[in-house]
Amino acid sequence: MSQTIHRSVKSLIDEANAEVETVSAADAIKAAQGDDVVIVDIRDPREIERDGKIPGAFSCTRGMLEFWIDPASPYAKPIFQQDKKFIFHCAGGLRSVLAAKTAQDMGLNSVAHMGGGFAAWRDAGGPVEKWEPKKKG
């Protein structure tokens, strides 16, 4: 039996884009210099290892987002309890708008996503640093 999908990923992204603030890479580069902004990288660690990361960005994989945001969760991260603006990014801007909408729907204040994602950041001349996973040992 085949599945019938009632809401396409395109419609989810369109809805999220209608509800979430989008900031340009250039504006995100400027915002990242302040103490009142957290850049949240939702890419998979393998993407970060391959392509690098934005210096100072907080890494939160898409799969843990809700658990790390919710202060009642045993996995809650204190960074999400701060009174700051959270700018989410992924590789190209699709996953991050969905993540930002989820964060906003959960009640996180001052949420945005970076249009064009990490690629736009890099193309706009934003700083990038190499990242290597922690060695287990």
Image (cartoon, rainbow, N blue to C red):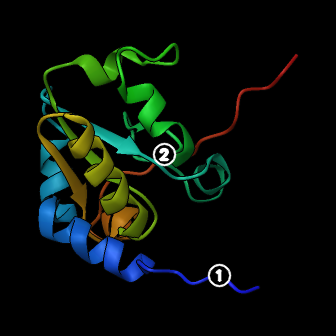
Residue 59 visible in this rendered orientation of the protein: no
Q: Is residue 59 left or right of residue 132?
A: left
Residue 96's quadrant in the figure? bottom left
Q: Which mark is residue 129?
A: 2
Q: Is residue 53 above or below residue 38?
A: below
Q: Is residue 73 above or below residue 32?
A: above
Frontmost residue, 97 versus 135? 97
Q: Residue at x 19, y 34 (%)?
A: 107
- How packed is label 1: few (under 14 Cα within 10 Å), some, or many (20 or more)? few
Q: Is residue 11 left or right of residue 68?
A: left
Residue 20 x %, y % = 16, 59
- How packed is label 2: few (under 14 Cα within 10 Å), some, or many (20 or more)? few
Q: Residue at x 19, y 53 (%)?
A: 28
Residue 76 visible in this rendered orientation of the protein: yes
Q: Which residue is mark 1?
A: 3
Frontmost residue, 131 versus 88? 88
